[in-house]
């Protein structure tokens, strides 16, 4: 990554609302405001950019925004595959939580963290493979809770949700505000749970086939261009490996807290 | 030139618009390159005919054409900003903010661009087309191009590719 600091660039932009992404062929472009620019060359695994003094000296810019974005954009080209799932760990065993957007992965993650699980990530988990062992990584990014989470976590009252890159409003919580357990950055996933909301009360666990798990991730993954066949192959291989975890459907009509207790009991029993 | 309506392209699995269709194609002859233009907007075609006629006939047509893939980005309604250039290795990026981002790859002889909706024919002709031509020269004239140092950058200057 080559980043140029240009003191002449204005720093009066909002990273979350004024960052614009586009891609063609093996390029991904990100403009921040009207002057700051990053270009990701996925073919050569290279990032070049120019930033203002304000961005260069802002740890939040790098740690919470730009490094996660860079891993998300470039990861697949270096064997680190971003998966849209949360990840938690207890007793050395990792739990990946997947599901459609809005199903409640983040609220359940927070509820599990408050039951003693270590929170690794609530939204995007980065999967790599080392010596035939899967490793799920988090980036210590803030946890995003949608505004309706206030019904489950009254302590959010008084906070103001912020706009995120995709335009949605969300509360932002630091991991230290959530976790009872010490923060960790990676885990070996054992379980993969697909969360579904149910109109009926209760919380059911049903086995999920590896084929269904693969299909879920393959069909929800961002399309990659023809210029990146190796990255597509790496991603598919990693998805196959993740789908070899113990996979379960979790259908819940309960609050995040009650669902978290059920998940916690399930993990203790299994 | 017939009117051509550019429809907004959205695919939930293509957030970056990588697969925006570019069904319109034409060849452009520059002094130093034959260019194959692929785009989704016919309005880019007329300014091409205004290129310096002396540049319109290739003196020695290169074996491989340079690809220009230019996407009219109807979701970007910002005006162009001051130009900036970032160079690194075989890559050069010319940007005027989200309304104009151009990437040139010397190894692959490709130039890709997103042009916002507010960029009219005059801005395209006066600001962007010259940049495209200079970038094409950068891409095609490998043997005569100056060595490009890693992350050599010029911000705020006219395109010097």
Image: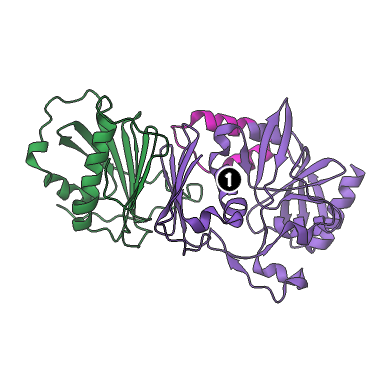
For residue B123, side relative to residue A178 (left or right): left
Residue found 41% across the figure and 57% down from its top: A9
Most frequent secondary structure within the magenta stretch: helix
For residue A33, side relative to residue A127 (left or right): left
Residue found 71% across the figure and 57% down from its top: A106
Which residues make up the magenta segment? A209-237
Q: Secondary structure at mark 1?
A: helix
Residue A221 seen: no
Which chain does green denote in the image?
Answer: B
Which chain does purple denote in the image?
Answer: A
Count up the numbered dots: 1
Between residue A132 and residue A257, name the one nearer to us: A132
Q: Is residue B4 magenta?
A: no
Chain designation of label 1: A
Q: Horizontal and vertical percent for residue A67? A: 58, 47
For residue B45, side relative to residue A95 (left or right): left
The residue positioned farthest toward the left in the image shown: B53
Quadrant location of residue B86?
top left
Q: Residues within 10 Å of mark 1 (few under 14, many from 20)?
A: some
For residue A244, side relative to residue B46 (left or right): right
Quadrant location of residue B6?
bottom left
The residue positioned farthest toward the bottom in the image shown: A158
The residue positioned farthest toward the front in the image shown: A7
The residue positioned farthest toward the right in the image shown: A269
Vertical position of residue A9 compared to residue A235: above or below: below
Q: Check disc 1 and report the residue beneath it.
A: A220
Residue A173 seen: yes
Instruction: Pick the quarter of the image with the C terminus of chain B.
Output: top left
Between residue A61 and residue A186, name the one nearer to us: A61
Between residue A3 and residue A192, name the one nearer to us: A3
Q: Horizontal and vertical percent for residue A111? A: 80, 59
């Amino acid at each position: 990554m080559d980043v140029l600091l240009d003191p002449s660039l204005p720093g009066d932009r909002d990273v979350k609302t004024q960052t614009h992404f586009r891609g063609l062929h093996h390029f991904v472009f990100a403009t921040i405001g009207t002057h700051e620019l990053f270009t990701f060359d996925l073919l050569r695994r290279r990032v070049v950019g120019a930033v203002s003094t304000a961005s260069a000296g802002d740890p939040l810019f790098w740690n919470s925004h730009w490094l996660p974005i860079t891993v998300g954009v470039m990861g697949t080209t270096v064997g680190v595959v971003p998966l849209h799932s949360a990840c938690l760990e207890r007793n050395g065993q990792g739990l990946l939580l997947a599901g459609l957007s809005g199903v409640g992965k983040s609220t359940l993650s927070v509820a599990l963290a408050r039951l003693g699980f270590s929170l690794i990530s609530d939204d995007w988990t980065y999967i790599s493979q080392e010596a035939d062992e899967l490793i799920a990584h988090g980036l210590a990014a803030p946890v995003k809770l949608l505004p309706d989470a206030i019904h489950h976590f009254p302590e959010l009252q008084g906070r103001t949700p912020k706009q995120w890159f995709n335009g949605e409003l969300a509360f932002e919580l630091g991991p230290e505000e959530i976790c009872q357990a010490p923060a960790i950055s990676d885990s070996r996933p054992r379980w993969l749970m697909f969360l579904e909301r149910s109109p009926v009360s209760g919380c059911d666990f049903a086995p999920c086939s590896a084929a269904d798990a693969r299909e879920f991730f393959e069909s929800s993954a961002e399309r990659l261009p023809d210029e990146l066949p190796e990255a597509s192959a790496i991603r598919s291989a990693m998805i196959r490996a993740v789908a070899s975890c113990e996979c379960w459907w979790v259908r819940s009509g309960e609050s995040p807290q009650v669902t978290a207790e059920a998940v916690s009991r399930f993990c203790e029993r299994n | 030139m017939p009117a051509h309506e550019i429809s907004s392209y959205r695919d939930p699995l293509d957030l970056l618009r990588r697969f925006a269709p570019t069904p319109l194609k034409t060849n452009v002859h520059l002094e130093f390159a034959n260019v194959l233009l692929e785009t989704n907007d016919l309005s880019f075609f007329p300014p091409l005919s205004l290129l310096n006629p002396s540049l319109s006939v290739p003196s020695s047509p290169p074996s491989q054409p340079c690809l220009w893939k230019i996407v009219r980005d109807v979701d970007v309604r910002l005006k162009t900003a001051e130009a900036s250039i970032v160079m690194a290795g075989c890559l050069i990026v010319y940007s005027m903010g989200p309304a104009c981002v151009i990437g040139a790859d010397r190894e692959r002889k490709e130039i890709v661009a997103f042009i916002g909706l507010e960029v009219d024919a005059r801005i395209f002709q006066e600001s962007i087309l010259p940049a495209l031509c200079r970038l094409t020269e950068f891409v095609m004239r490998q043997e005569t191009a100056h060595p490009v140092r890693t992350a050599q950058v010029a911000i705020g200057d006219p395109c010097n590719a």
